[in-house]
Amino acid sequence: MPVRFPGHYRIPHFPIKLTSTPSNRICHRNPTLKSFTSTRKMTTKTQSPKVAFILDFDGTITTKDTISTLFKIGLSKQASLGIDKSQAHEEIISSYGDEFSKHVQNYRPVKEERTKLWDEFDYHRSLRDVEVRSFERVSTSGVFAGISESEWEEFGRQAVRNGDVIIRNGFAEFCRAVEKQAGVWGVVSVNFSRGFIRGVLEEALKANTRVDIFSNVLDERGIIERSKIEGWMPSKEVIATSDFKLAAMHCLIDTWKKSPIGKYPLHAVYIGDSGTDIECLMDDSVQEIIMAESSSSPLIDILARLGIGVRNIEGYPDSDDDNLLWARDFAEISQSKFLVCFHT
């Protein structure tokens, strides 16, 4: 299936136009949710497809968000240098919480009145100013100053070893199964630190990995920047909201298409767990799996409000319905027929 940049959506079918910035409002057409038509056609064996998984990090590969772990690392680093950044940390958390709450309170339409997919996209995109201001407060605080990329990688490994970061069940086995099928996988994340993500992955897999990670980076000044991504617009804006995450996903897919695996048809699959993943999950160029503890996660509840059905991956592909898929962990994905369907 063709990959479109910056994106087309199954519900409704219209393009997102990203010109100077992905935060432009999406164009409003008026299709209904009933117009949903599945694009998830099984590729024939003669086409030699390769499966390509795009994975969110926080709450998908890990069982919970890792932001508190990052701050714990930063505060400890500064303390080792005789610098107390606890007040700066408290101000970052407090200011973000206040701004976020005020934004949600004042935003219209309110959650209960957002019943169309594009309304939900607009809401998540509207959070960009709140998120970017928080990123800027982090960057100017000095909480993460003096930490190199290699140190972040080691901190990531240590966080897994000491239990600060818990990896979702079956992750390593899932990655080995994808690679055994000559498939590919990579990470798209709004996380502050690419180095931390890489360290976590390497400890989880018990191996060095050069897997593609499209996220933000913390330089040694402690400033958050977006990692250099081929094909990305020249703007240096960070990945903080669903629209920028969508653009990063398409850049990752385009990167794979230019690599040796690109000579094969790619069946792209996105796995994510939260609101920042909603545009990636609903993009027409990917199949989707929602990572959730149960059938009533916050993201699944959002989709239910929008009239979008979600079913557990256990029965895949026995049902012909167009519902999205959800899984509790990577073991459940591996134990289903999902990967088998793409084995050639």
Image: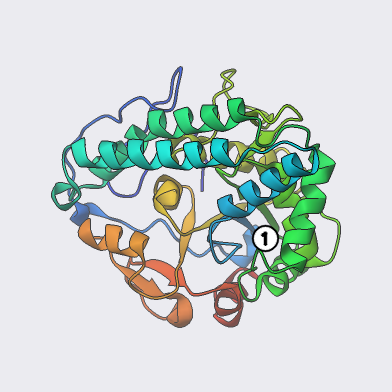
User: Which residue appears at 59% of the width and 82% of the height?
Assistant: 335
Badge 1: residue crowd in 10 Å (few <14, some 14–19, many ≥20): some
Q: Quadrant of the C terminus?
A: bottom right
- On the image, the x and y values in percent for residue 95 come to 41, 36
Height in image: 339 above or below 258? below
Q: Position of residue 74 (x, y in %)?
A: 69, 43
Q: What color scheme is it?
A: rainbow
Identify the amino acid type marked 1: Ser
Q: Is residue 293 above or below residue 200?
A: below
- Name the secondary structure under disc 1: loop
Q: Foreground: 97 or 1? A: 97
Question: Is residue 165 at least partly visible in the picture?
Answer: yes
Instruction: Pick out the residue farthest to the left.
Output: 113
> Residue 82: x and y, percent?
77, 38
Q: Is residue 26 left or right of residue 66?
A: left
**Image location (x, y in percent) of residue 329:** 55, 73
Figure quadrant of residue 7: top left
Query: Residue at 62% of width from left, 40% of height from top?
Result: 215
Count of all numbered marks drawn on residues in the image:
1
- The front one of 275 and 254 is 275
Q: Residue at x 69, y 29 (%)?
A: 228
Q: Residue at x 36, y 44 (%)?
A: 9
Seen in the picture, residue 274 relative to 63 is either above or below; the reply is above
Residue 55 in view, yes or no: no
Q: Is residue 140 above or below residue 46?
A: above
> Image check: 124 left or right of 166?
left
Where is mark 1, residue-wise? 48
Q: Can you tell which quarter of the image residue 195 is in?
A: top right
